[in-house]
Amino acid sequence: MSNAELELMAKIGVFVGTVYGGAEEVAHEAVDLLIDKGHAAQMYLEPKLEDFLEYQHDVALVITSTTGQGEIPENLLPLFAALNDRFPLMPELRFGVIAMGDSSYGEERYCGAGRQFEVLLTELQAKPQVERLDVDACIHFDPMEVAMPWLEGLIEQLS
């Protein structure tokens, strides 16, 4: 690979909040696509603050389902809490969020986990690379139908 090609590659951490495996499936596909497009991508299913901070000068992609009353899944909650408690400002971090939910639970709860993460990252001065994608399980039985075009748009922004 030439130096110019190496400079185009982004280092992307994919942080997953999942309960029944849907968000994890989307994350696997996202990582495969990012790698196919020449980026360095790694998935974190039990992410720690240290894992996230490794990307503070790069790109973070949060892919999360929403549980119960619009809450963050248990596997992603410790990361959210640590970011909120330590509040490390990350003005160089670029991020994207895929929020998965079910609109039949009501507007306040719908995609609540992804919305919470987006608000926190913005408060930490991170820059959204693309608009958050809300995937409604009532409309999209296969979340990849909307996630793949969104990911292609993210990849365009990274190049």
Image (cartoon, rainbow, N blue to C red):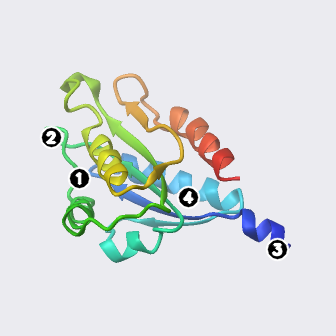
| Residue type, label 2 | Gly
Question: What amino acid type should be assigned to the residue bearing mark 3?
Answer: Asn
Compare marks 1 and 4 and give the one earlier in the sequence: 4
Q: Secondary structure at mark 3?
A: helix
The picture places residue 41, in percent across and down from the top left corner, at 56, 65
Question: Marks 2 and 4: in contact by CB < 8 Å?
Answer: no
The structure residue drawn at horizontal position 22% and vertical position 59%, both measured from the top left corner, is 77
Which residue: 69% across, 58% down? 36
Pointer 1 residue? 73
Q: Which mark is residue 113?
A: none
Q: Are marks 3 and 4 in contact (CB under 8 Å)?
A: no
- Mark with earlier residue (3, 4): 3
The residue wearing badge 2 is 68
Question: What residue is disc 4 on?
Answer: 31
Tell which residue pokes out farthest to the left in this image. Answer: 69
Q: Are marks 1 and 4 in contact (CB under 8 Å)?
A: no
Separation of residues labelled 3 and 4 (CA atoms): 23 Å
Q: Mark 2 or mark 3: name the one nearer the start of the chain.
A: 3
Q: What amino acid does circle 1 point to?
A: Pro
Residue 112 seen from this side: yes
Identify the image quadrant of residue 109: top left
What residue is drawn where x is 41% and y is 64%? 90
User: Tag 4's secondary structure?
Assistant: helix
Q: Secondary structure at mark 1?
A: loop
User: Which element type, helix, strand or loop, lies under badge 2?
Assistant: loop
Q: Position of residue 120 (x, y in %)?
A: 29, 51
To which residue does mark 3 refer? 3
Judge from the rendering whether residue 64 lies leftward or rightward of residue 129; answer left or right: left
- What kind of residue is marked 4? Val
* Circle 2 crowding by C-alpha within 10 Å: few under 14, some 14–19, many from 20: few
- Where residue 52 sits in the image (x, y, percent)? 39, 69
